[in-house]
Amino acid sequence: MKFYITTPIYYVNAEPHIGSAYTTIIADIIARYKRMIGYDVFFLTGTDEHGLKILQAAQAAGRDVKEFCDELAGKFKQLWKDLKITNDFFIRTTDPQHEETVRFFVKKMMENGDIYKGKYSGWYCVHCETYYDESEVLEKDGKKVCPTCGREVKWVEEENYFFRLSKYNDALKKHFEENPDFVEPDFRKNEMLKILEKGLKDISITRTTFKWGVPFPGDEKHVIYVWVDALINYVSAIGYGRDEETFNKYWPADVHLIGKEINRFHSLIWPAMLISVGLPLPKKIFAHGWLTVNGQKISKSLGNAIDPRRFVEKYGNDVIRYYLVRDIVFGKDGDFSEEKLVTRLNADLANDYGNLLHRTLAMVKKHFSNKIPKPSESTDLDPQLKEKTLKTVENYIKLMDSYKLTEALETVWDLISFVNTYFDRTRPWILAKEGKMEKLATVLYNTSEAILKVAMMTLPIMPDTSEEVFRRLGFKEKVTPELLKTWGTLKPGSEAIHGKPLFEKIELKDLKKVAEVKKGVKEKVRSEEAGIITIDDFAKVDLRVAKILSAEKVEGSEKLIKMEIDLGELGKRQLVGGLAKYYKPEELVGKLIIVVANLKPRKLFGIESQGMLLAAKKGDKLTLLTVEGEIEPGAKIS
Ligand code: MSP
């Protein structure tokens, strides 16, 4: 039995944050769960590296675009390693093999008569890499903005190649009808059905105004639209067109796990592309909700794009994973709040779960010399505990299989609370006092066995914790579906280890200190939002007058000019700037310009620029900043 699960591939325009980690953590939980119940799992994630958004991000950072992608893809890979994500492969859309597969796929669409040349005019959102027509865009402060992200959209008019998406409207409708679980949750499916009801339009699938993409087969002036390129990752990663054996083994995907805003691409465009090339459709698309942080949208400019590692270092990986599944109802939007996380840690993990193990093993240590006792004489409550545990396992499997992750955890915690009640009602400390050792042995065995089942069920969510519980209970086997579903799998006589409590509680008041720091940050963010900086912020920038000594065009670049400048007391430096469209090199020589002299050197086109010159730009015009009269190079600007 195979199970193929994917995450979206992440744009490498910025570093990953807790929102991007959410999809991957959830996918990891599902992948680990399926492995545990016996599937041969292929779990795929990766990075989406072509297109205008990435190109512009690299340019804004003054970096060579491939180098920029390499660095960011490395950061994603590292984060997944730190978060112990168990993906089987990491695909990058700049992998040559993927690029080849994209061309192969698009050629097949062409062979099927699904691609034609036409003229595109409409709105484009670079942030979402999405085309919109007039009726879709919104208006804000007199500007046209993207209905998904609210950023300004740009008018695009180009000769493009189009995909006959409209041709597949009926086939898709039929597929939705015949496969009512194709898109989940239901309300997301309904959004798709509405679009199909209105009727799909053909979409532009190439661009000509930049080159950062896969060249279109047969007309290399065009690059393939980044979304078409990206979606194909799901088949290229498993060898489509190259490795038929692996491909046939894993395709179709069992689930594409995605965020809600990219549902249209996955539930309509991607299936139509697959029908076009004659491939079966993925079995399910599950669109989850969005995370906010303390009630705010996650965004770099708001400064709340938290690196998940910060929380992992503070609370541990398992606690974060538990919190994300337990508190954010899977499928819906939810808010990440540190206070709520600590509340869950203290109540669910430290009190309910950790304490149960701790008090059970304390008695195993005291009365049975750390050996899991053999059950014999039964109390009235024992059959109930066994029944409840096995029923919980059954429910858990049902819920996990239908992606009801939050409910699955709720069921497990309901069992934990049942076991705690069992422990309290059988009163093992009284049994010990009265010397009823056989009954005591039964109670401690049963409690340990129920805890073992809890650890098995939570293994995909809290892998390290479960491993630790196995160790403490002396359970050394690999979890199998049979062991999970059977009562009595813990061997009497196993060596138990009492050890420290599993989870340490955190006082909520300690968090206050964190909150105060956060308040400071918030105020800073607020003034940053208003565009206000302090005099100290300004003083950090070392602005100087510099004289251009020589200038020449950078070979191979249409934009860049390399200059040697004199910065007086700071010496001579090399500068690279995007001036070639506005100045001839010889016009620059001798000019007194303004330079940021303390900027970290960076490479443009492989050439180091040791500073940045200032210029005013409006529309197509650009003019260099200079000084009104003669002044020595190196003069400070204040
Ligand atoms: N590159 C495309 C996907 C192409 S898949 C063929 C893309 N990338 S993304 O980096 O913008 O988003 C990747 C995933 O992260 C999406 O599923 C998105 O929903 C998710 N998240 C990004 N921010 C998020 C939150 N704040 N909360 C939850 N998930 C969010 O789209």
Image (spheres, helix red, strand yellow):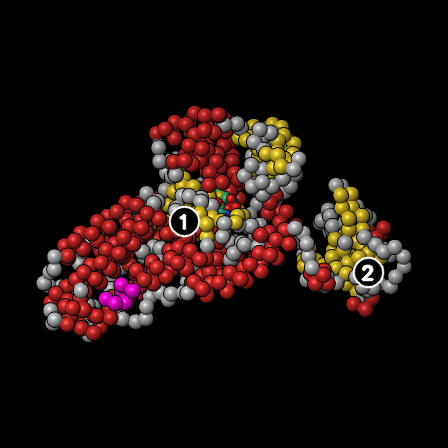
Residues at badges 2 and 1 in contact (C-beta under 8 Å)? no
Mark 2: secondary structure:
strand
Mark 1: secondary structure:
loop
Reply yes or no: does residue 173 show up in magenta: no
Reply yes or no: does residue 358 show up in magenta: yes
Q: Is 393 placed above or below 103 here?
A: below
Q: Which residue is mark 2?
A: 545
Disc 2 CB within 8 Å of nearest ligand 1 atom: no
Q: Is residue 491 visible?
A: no
Residue 432, position in %: x, y?
15, 71
Figure quadrant of the C terminus: bottom right
Name the front one of labels 2 and 1: 1
Residue 403, position in %: x, y?
35, 44
Residue 609 in which image quadrant: bottom right
Q: Is 83 placed above or below 366 here?
A: above
Check disc 1: other Cα within 10 Å, few if <14, some if 14-19, many if 20+: some
Q: Main secondary structure of the magenta part?
A: helix
Residue 420 in which image quadrant: bottom left
Closer to the N terminus: mark 2 or mark 1? 1
Q: Which mark is residue 328?
A: 1
Which residue appears at 54% of the width and 59% of the height? Answer: 518
- Residue 554 left/right relative to 495: right
Which residue appears at 46% of the width and 52% of the height? Answer: 336
User: 436 or 40, which lies in front?
Assistant: 436
User: What amino acid is labelled 2 in the image?
Assistant: Val
* Distance from the alpha carbon under mark 2 to that under mark 1: 54 Å
Check disc 2: other Cα within 10 Å, few if <14, some if 14-19, many if 20+: many
Which residue appears at 28% of the width and 59% of the height? Answer: 455
User: What amino acid is labelled 1 in the image?
Assistant: Ile
Residue 119 in which image quadrant: top right
Residue 478, position in %: x, y?
27, 59
Q: Which residues are magenta?
A: 355-360
